[in-house]
Amino acid sequence: MTFQDLNLNTPLYNALGDLGFTTPTPIQAEAFNVVSSGKDVVGIAQTGTGKTFAYMLPILKSLKFSTQENPRVLVLVPTRELVVQVVDEIEKLSKYINNRVLGVYGGTNINTQKKAIAEGIDILVATPGRMYDLALSRVLQLKSIQKLVIDEVDVMLDLGFRHQLINIFDILPPKRQNIMFSATMTQDVDLLLNDFFKTPERVSIAVSGTPLDNISQQRYNVPNFYTKVNLLTHLLNDTERYNKVLIFVAYKRMADRLFESLDEIFHDELCVIHSNKTQNYRLRSIEQFREGMNRILIATDVMARGLDIDNISHVINFDTPDFPENYMHRIGRTGRAERQGESLLFSTVKEQELVENIENLMVMEIPVMEIPEVVEISTELIEEERPQIKERNNPLKRKDEDIAGPAFHDKSEKNSKENLGGSYKFKIAAKYKKPKTRGDKNYNKRNKK
Ligand code: AMP
């Protein structure tokens, strides 16, 4: 396939020609028609796959010349580095197109950005916080936004931008196309998609299903959570063999639960990272694991994706990932730099189908190991494993502390405030919170006296 097959236009062909690009990358080929169709889309692709052009090519093809001031395309990305990078990519593609692209992010002078916005733009690339501030100030008008792109959704959610995204959805015109890109599908991403988008079409490129030769893989069929803990404990007791172990779980609540279960025995060698932990805590945990001060690290998928840590002896998949791509990302944390690595996969009966998906992707079977006899098979079940009891007032239903609350962690003070709804909050904030100039605090104080 060549770019000619995508029926682009002359300015785009010329720009691609200048860049020396002739062939669309797999995600570009996959995404083009879906994004062009105007439907909501979620693309699963990592940086480096050409995903920026995957959404920008169809967007730029359909964006007509306009002199109106308000932006029509909004691209949200999690970090300023990405703002710069995405603007740069759009500019490369727009070399022969008369459009106005602007990147904005926090930590820099907002007034300069306001001025640039007031001059009129077509495409705004922004981090969520700064974009929201600009919208509150009313300099940025969002009523003409037709396309919303959220890039790196998984990172966005892991950095805690969920509430900010929801507030932003609320002030955008409801009739718009939503285009989302994420490197991995995670529970958080799934939740966001289910809560806010009309069954987005999914495009993804096949992650290479060929596991690295230097990673040996084995799996255990384990009946439940507590037996998994017993098996894991048994394995981890062999400190010599299991000398640097990265344990993956699907979501933070499970990470915390596993941490609590292992903490008693492996207290001094154990750390856990997920998005509810502070940045400092996470960095410290990773550093301690990297340097070998902690032998065992429990992590969620997103957190560990970018980790490049040498000499990981074992990756243990405490659960079986819903998406086979995530399994490939996980096991790739070991066996780096030509060293040998081992990967173990724990699966319950319910997870067998997921195991099959993984094996199909790799076109190989993962050898099954017997659970050693010394490992106690537990019959106790955690909340998620118990059969769902539907009747109301069932006297057998367990009560009190066994029942999972809506959130495992106490909400932070900010988030536990009453939800007034985005638009109302927006109005109030616009009215009271952001005066045009606050003046110099110290100067004002002095003059009050
Ligand atoms: P991205 O995944 O969007 O971060 O892109 C990764 C790099 O691939 C960028 O430097 C792009 O300029 C480059 N790139 C994008 N599309 C193509 C293509 N079709 N052929 C060659 N390189 C590309």
Image (cartoon, rainbow, N blue to C red):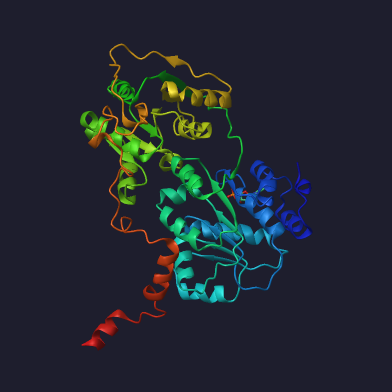
Q: Tell me which residue sits at (47%, 55%) in the image.
A: 78
Q: In this view, does 264 lie above or below 129?
A: above
Left or right of residue 271: residue 32: right
Q: Is residue 227 left or right of residue 11?
A: left
Residue 267 in the image: state x and y as whole percent: 22, 33
Q: Which residue in the rendered view is the most extreme toward the top?
A: 373
Q: Residue at x 40, y 32 (%)?
A: 311
Could you tell me which residue is drawn at 63 percent across and 67 percent down? 122
Q: In this view, does 206 lie to the left or right of 393?
A: right
Residue 319 or residue 415, whichever sits in front: 415
- Residue 168 higher or lower than 368, as above or below: below
Res. 23 image quadrant: top right
Quadrant for the C terminus, please. Answer: bottom left
Q: Where is residue 328 in the image (x, y as percent from the top left)?
A: 51, 32
Q: Which is nearer the eye, 155 or 107?
A: 155
In the rendered image, is residue 137 in sight? yes
Asked whether, in this view, residue 173 is left or right of residue 318, the answer is: right
Could one spot residue 106 in this view of the protein? no
The correct choice, above or below, for 117 with respect to 408 in the image is below
Residue at the image position 43 percent from the left and 62 percent from the top: 422
- Quarter of the image with the N terminus is top right
Q: How many labels does the image show?
A: 0
Image coords of residue 30 (percent x, y): 67, 42
Nearer to us in this view, 310 or 186? 186
Image x and y of residue 129, in percent: 44, 62
